[in-house]
Structure formats: C-alpha cells, structure tokens
Image: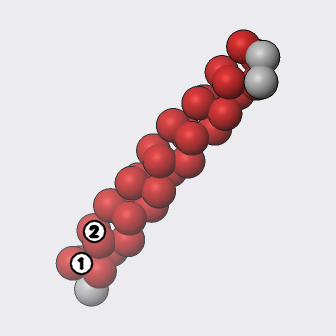
C-alpha cells in the first residue's frame, strides 16, 4: 500500500468510528426522552 491509500483508510476508519459513536449517543438520548 502506498501512503495515499493508508491515509484514506485511516480517515475512513476515523469517520466511521465518529459516526458510530454519534449515532449511538443520539439513539440513547432519544430513548431516554421516550
């Protein structure tokens, strides 16, 4: 793998993790409100 591909994979992974955490947090907040 060259450097550009590594950067792309790292960015995609970070974005995926942030989206997952944000979605989970939002779902929990909605559930608490009922």
Residue matched to label 1? 33
Query: Residue 21 lies in what quarter of the image?
Result: bottom left
- Tell me the residue at 77%/24% (across/down): 1
Which of the pair 21/31 is nearer the observer?
Answer: 21
| SS at mark 2 in the image | helix
Crowding at label 1, few (<14), some or many (≥20) Cα neighbours within 10 Å? Answer: few
Residue 5: give x, y in percent of width and height: 76, 24
In space, the residues marked 1 and 2 are separated at their CA atoms by 6 Å
Horizontally, residue 24 falls left or right of residue 19, namely left
Is 17 drawn above or below residue 33 in the view shown? above
| SS at mark 1 in the image | helix
* Most distant residue in the top direction: 3
Q: Are marks 1 and 2 in contact (CB under 8 Å)?
A: yes
Horizontally, residue 14 falls left or right of residue 2, namely left
Q: Nearer the viewer, mark 1 or mark 2?
A: 2
Query: Residue 15 lies in what quarter of the image?
Result: top right
* Most distant residue in the front direction: 1
Query: Residue 26 lies in what quarter of the image?
Result: bottom left
Residue 18: give x, y in percent of width and height: 45, 44
Is 12 drawn above or below residue 24 in the view shown? above
Residue 14: give x, y in percent of width and height: 51, 37
Q: Which mark is residue 29?
A: 2
């Amino acid at each position: 793998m060259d450097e550009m591909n590594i950067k792309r994979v790292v960015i995609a992974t970070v974005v995926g993790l942030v989206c997952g955490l944000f979605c989970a947090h939002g779902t929990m907040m909605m559930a608490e409100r009922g």
